[in-house]
Image (tube, grey):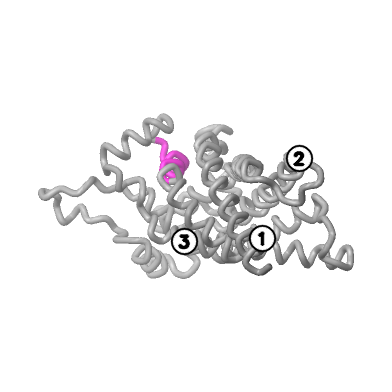
Amino acid sequence: MEFIAGAIGGGLSVAVGYPLDTVKVRIQTERSYNGIWHCIRETYKAEKAWGFYKGMSLSVSTVSLVSSFSFGAYRNFLYNICRLRYGTSDVKPSKVDISVAGCATGAVRVVLISPTETAKVRMQTQKQSHYSVTASPLSKPKYQGPVHCLRMIAKEEGFGGLYKGCSALLCRDCHSFATYFLTYNILCDWFTPAGKDKPDILTVLISGGSAGVFGWAVATPMDVMKSRMQVDNLGQRKYRGLIHCIRVSVKEEGIRVLFKGLGLNCIRAFPVNMVVFVTYEAVMRLAEDLMK
């Protein structure tokens, strides 16, 4: 049921957060925007509302799959960690147990999400004016859709092109997922009254939203590097690897470059992860009631 609940929560979260995710990616990868509102205005002016939803069709399906995998993997890692440490899974896991399970979940996610993350970022940064009857055929975008984008990357850059930036993605997800699940569990424990074994809906909303904010706060520096490496075209490659990308970016734009999109990430993370956790908890509790 963890897999099913995670899939439903992940799918719903895409609809909530995708437009701001597009803005976040553009701010992180391009120097032409002065801030969030400038990016939103320029994107809408050039591409209308469609510009905020580029690559979303792939994300809906893959985020559902990945969210399903993430929650299922986390629960299984936690179950096995408790069995190894305490001899049984029927104990309250420690903060270390939760952190290790979250970190392991973030690490194994990379294999699944790296290709779709690369395609998503390429689609989101691809510029195209909104449709016009006078538009020239020459203005046709390079990537016709998410699947076409994946095929083109594999054709032009090889299989490795689909895993561009995976080192930054690994660094991002390991510590961010440890923070994510740890924050959620700590806040649920704090806000749940003594004697109750499950948090109420308000606690889930606050804890889930806060977990997303803290998770993205620690993830943003590596998220910036990941996005930059993923849009780094083969023919004009600028970055030789993660360390080189960090050095070049900080040298050209200062230390602030590591926190580009931080505010937007946190604003987006709260409602998105409220939806994820409240959906997850609702599905899990419904399943428990049906099995009684």
- The residue identified by callout 2 is 190
Q: Is residue 9 left or right of residue 90?
A: left
User: Residue 181 bears which disc, if any?
Assistant: none
Q: Say which element carries label 2.
A: helix
**Residue 272 among magenta residues:** no
Question: At label 2, which amino acid type do we have?
Answer: Trp
Residue at image point 70% right, 56% down = 103
Magenta residues? 22-31
Mark 3 or mark 2, which has the lower sequence index? 3
Q: Say which element carries label 3.
A: helix
- The residue identified by callout 3 is 116
Residue at image point 10% right, 48% down = 134
Picture coordinates of residue 61, whole percent (x, y): 45, 63
Marks 3, 1: nearer the viewer: 1
Inter-mark Cα distance, 3 to 1 = 17 Å
Question: At label 1, which amino acid type do we have?
Answer: Thr
Picture coordinates of residue 70, whole percent (x, y): 61, 61
Query: Residue 121 or 12: which is nearer the viewer?
Result: 12
Can residue 250 be seen by looking at this rendering? no
